[in-house]
Amino acid sequence: MHFLSDNTASISPEILDAIHAANAGQVPAYGDDPWTKRLDGVFTDFFGAPVCVFPVATGTAANALSLATLVPPYGAIYTHEDAHILRDECGAPEFYTGGARIVTVSSAMGKLTHSALAAALDAAPPSVHTYQPAAVALTQATELGTVYQPDEISAIAALAHDRQLFVQMDGARFANALVSLGVAPADITWKAGVDVLSFGATKNGALAAEAVVFFSRELARDFELRRKRGGHLLSKLRYVSAQLLAYLESGLWKRNAELANGFAARIGAAAAAHLLYPVQANEVFVQLGDLRKKVLRDAGFEFYDWGAQDSGAARLVASWDQNERDVEALCTMLRRL
Amino acid sequence: MHFLSDNTASISPEILDAIHAANAGQVPAYGDDPWTKRLDGVFTDFFGAPVCVFPVATGTAANALSLATLVPPYGAIYTHEDAHILRDECGAPEFYTGGARIVTVSSAMGKLTHSALAAALDAAPPSVHTYQPAAVALTQATELGTVYQPDEISAIAALAHDRQLFVQMDGARFANALVSLGVAPADITWKAGVDVLSFGATKNGALAAEAVVFFSRELARDFELRRKRGGHLLSKLRYVSAQLLAYLESGLWKRNAELANGFAARIGAAAAAHLLYPVQANEVFVQLGDLRKKVLRDAGFEFYDWGAQDSGAARLVASWDQNERDVEALCTMLRRL
Amino acid sequence: MHFLSDNTASISPEILDAIHAANAGQVPAYGDDPWTKRLDGVFTDFFGAPVCVFPVATGTAANALSLATLVPPYGAIYTHEDAHILRDECGAPEFYTGGARIVTVSSAMGKLTHSALAAALDAAPPSVHTYQPAAVALTQATELGTVYQPDEISAIAALAHDRQLFVQMDGARFANALVSLGVAPADITWKAGVDVLSFGATKNGALAAEAVVFFSRELARDFELRRKRGGHLLSKLRYVSAQLLAYLESGLWKRNAELANGFAARIGAAAAAHLLYPVQANEVFVQLGDLRKKVLRDAGFEFYDWGAQDSGAARLVASWDQNERDVEALCTMLRRL
Amino acid sequence: MHFLSDNTASISPEILDAIHAANAGQVPAYGDDPWTKRLDGVFTDFFGAPVCVFPVATGTAANALSLATLVPPYGAIYTHEDAHILRDECGAPEFYTGGARIVTVSSAMGKLTHSALAAALDAAPPSVHTYQPAAVALTQATELGTVYQPDEISAIAALAHDRQLFVQMDGARFANALVSLGVAPADITWKAGVDVLSFGATKNGALAAEAVVFFSRELARDFELRRKRGGHLLSKLRYVSAQLLAYLESGLWKRNAELANGFAARIGAAAAAHLLYPVQANEVFVQLGDLRKKVLRDAGFEFYDWGAQDSGAARLVASWDQNERDVEALCTMLRRL
């Protein structure tokens, strides 16, 4: 019974069907195909504003490439201390930018705050001897299962833009955040000041499909060259684009995120006494202690420890394809612990 | 009627079936799944020697990552002037190695030769002021549709090893070469001195699946870290691995390469008067002149020009899924030109 | 009256004399000259163990190049949060390593401690998703004017080596530390476990001369290639090497460091009521408050603010060529504040 | 008797005097000193147009940093096949640009030509799969001792600008070219379309002093950050700037270049029967054959072989401080050979 990660989930039937449907004879490679060509339009509809969209196969590529487009080698990227780009990408942002630095900011609940960012920026006035602040990177939903409100993003982005920094958003779990907030995609992206979004579908039902979404054509500048140079321009790109189209057009993003968030909400309710953070998306962080964790694992539940060694904390992630009985069994056991 | 590239081809049913079959519930991510775990064994059987295999989604990633594992930033990579790594990867090898240099060698038929390589190495004795020779990169089948004989590879590799250079092989069309030669996979790889192979499946029926095959565990050193850092470790890796397993285990590699090579042989025969190079794999290069090219295009045949502007040359690529009637129509027209 | 930095100091007569003496006709370039050839021997005598020495013109180059020789692009460098490589080199270590990450460790008095390092290493067990711990970088004397005791270095280095990390030392003020401790150069370098040292002379009387000192020939591997590639192999290298020879052989390192440390000790004594850290080398950090700082500046004393804006702290640096009366005037005023 | 390189030469007395004169007490570091602040003005007078000047200590740094300021990681630099940036900098341009590629162009006499450049640019129309042409790099005087005429530079620069490429000039021997041509500095730089110049003084009498001269403030953009990040911002920068000031203001550049060019002219005249290229600066290339070379070397003359092994060619370089009798002895022997 897997509650390890939403990366362990399978592919939604809609995605497989879309791949099948795209498998119709020969079409030009490298994105010059009918599916890829439709992406800009479909994402423009989704976001309610003109966007430039570039499909890639991994979230790490989406993050690193979008940051590299905006941040020079001597630029600093400000992000939360729990950010994926900091902790889980083996330095991909540093690699793609040519050695930019990620500056970490501490604040509660996995969310960067205006004041914490302001303090970090004020603490290091730029000189020729230091990195130049260049971008802020937000994660929506965050790595701690929380979600930024639109006005929280707006406040951060306004500060960032005021200081000539770009705003990048890691949206590996963007759909989970959208469903959680019940707002329009525009409300937590371009209307709030986001410049570029890594729009994830892989964790939420796709095989391997992420879209880098630029809310300004000018910023997209050299993205295509960087993608190719990074080896991330798939030759048979239609099969990635077709996933993204199905994900948006069939409403799969919403259905799957509702499933995953719903499972997490139930687990969170069952573990209410142990919650480390509010459950706002599809992840549940609990302070269980080693004994309770052992009991759960002995019962067949798989999940990751969280935090420092022997912290006693655990992370439980719900995917769209979670087995209903597994979830119920987990909730039952959590309530009893 | 596409003869543009084997990247325009669709996916073989065997590949789609394998993806379906792998879509069975939750499994650990990032390669800790049953499919990925079987790769080393299946490839070891295929090559008749112990190998380390790492799946990635693009050939550019396979080439750049394998080279970066072997070549330091101040290293030189010797390759043929028509190599894909030189002409068609927007500098991915330079990017992944941290700025290594590709040194181009000219020789006939798209194939590096022992003597041309020796001359190139002799021409630039290393000093602290210059790049240090570090690797030779071969392409099998070559970018000109020709194929290295086992002894040609052996001669080059012996020279390379004698000079402390590694031997990398770009096998984006490795299956086409194998079928063309009728030899064992070992004969043109480790037995001939190849250290690492980019084993391609995408051009020959897969959705997106390439395997980096190290013939020595020691050389694989830090490959996994470089792959992750490059954003090329897919989270749902089982779906790439499943493609590679189906490709090898069902014999798809052979069936599809036989189809593609067979089509190319027919086209080559029909265009015998115009051939630039012998047709040994699935590509046909012809010196047609602008008028004949226009006639073909007016008739609905799509293909790329080749060489310098106004050279009058053309490249015709045959894929496994080429329509039989299209091929016949092309041959008929070529014979008449 | 400058107390801004030891970089504002002039050149010692001994250094200028050595440059003059080296200006004798034509000699081979790029280090193949008599002065450079003597370096290994003279430094070997100084350290009491065989060393490999490479002269460069800046401390940033010495630090970045030595770290790049030891740390792969996916490696992590552990250092104190006040380290020069972190705060004052505009990312040179990241640039030269190809994107390694500097992990900052907090501990008192500007000095890394065994326990703080152990905690930092334990907090991030390496996986394929993260940077791999690769080196510890110490600064001797530290950026806060304190000095590591030999056993403090030994403890850190033992831990580092136990975890397969290299130990690099930024010795921009190495002479000040030596004079302060009264130990042999060996005691705080190779005997304590340091693998490579940036041995600075520029701040202590040279024009521009730093030596990268490897305590193992094997580790020096590709340093020469990296130096050349970084543009740091001076063509007329004899003039850098001659500075280093004069610096060591005439005892200038000691005389100048004694002068600078002596001035700092007097300033520290005069400001005893305001000291932030013990004065162990040639830097004095004082908590004066804005009013007292204004009084000093109005009296013509120049120095840098320290810490966060409005912290009220200040840094006073003493150089070897400080004017005796300036120091006395400063001390007098500090005692009165 | 050294005719190996102008890097083997000593320092002119004027340069040493300037260093002495600058050694007057404490001044701010990192270029905030009176000498460095005068550079822009003095170079503006020299070139007859407003320029931005940045001193560095090596020619490799000047070239690599200036190119990195203008060329993105996916950019191509077009240069002559004998260029120093290609052959003698161990990949510094690749390193500083983050992996740009140097595309070599063949043409006679060491000089790029308009037609050769046009052909090279036409041969590789940019696509997303290839490097993007970004800069042309010229060497004045060239590595073969020849000199570009102003109109030759203008023609190349016009083509470059027409294709949106920048024009960089490696002027390690700029003074030798100026003296040879008898034109104004402006005529072979900004008036002819050069965007940035590596202005060398080291080979012509300085200790270590090169100036990166931008003819447009806008292009200088982030140069300072890149210089610092590369470890090329010397702390005691006044001593480099003072060299450059003395070099220009005392007319040293002209006196020394006239000496070196004059020696080379005499050597060239004596070796007229063997010249490979016209002697237009301070280098002489001769086809002597192995026997004559041995005779020269047995007589105590030191020089480098040139070209492929056993080519029989040699390079003789004249410096400003060449011994009069040595030159005469060499000429006598060359006439007799």
Image (cartoon, coloured by chain):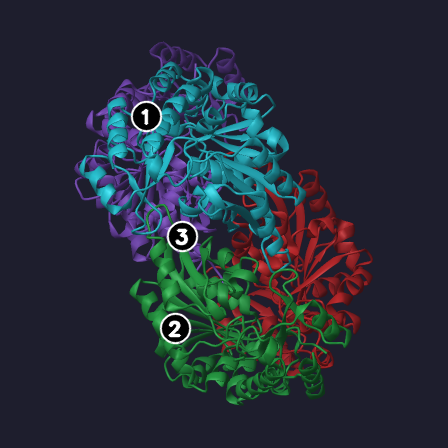
Chain colours: A cyan, B purple, C green, D red
Amino acid type of the residue tagged 2 in the rendering: Val
Q: Which numbered dot is residue C194? A: 2
Amino acid type of the residue tagged 3 in the rendering: Tyr
The mark nearer the N terminus, 3 or 2, is 3
Label 3 close to label 2 by CB (< 8 Å): no
Q: Residues within 10 Å of mark 3 (few under 14, many from 20)?
A: many
Residue C337: give x, y in percent of width and height: 69, 78
Q: Quick check: can you spot residue A161?
A: yes
Eyeballing the image, is C168 above or below B305? below
Residue tagged 1 = B206
Residue tagged 3 = C74
Q: Determine whether, in the image, residue B70 is placed left or right of residue A33.
A: left
- Label 2: chain? C
Q: Quick check: can you spot residue B234?
A: no
SS label for mark 2? loop
Eyeballing the image, is B12 above or below D189? above
The residue mark sitting in front, 2 or 1, is 2
Cα distance between the residues tagged 2 and 1: 52 Å
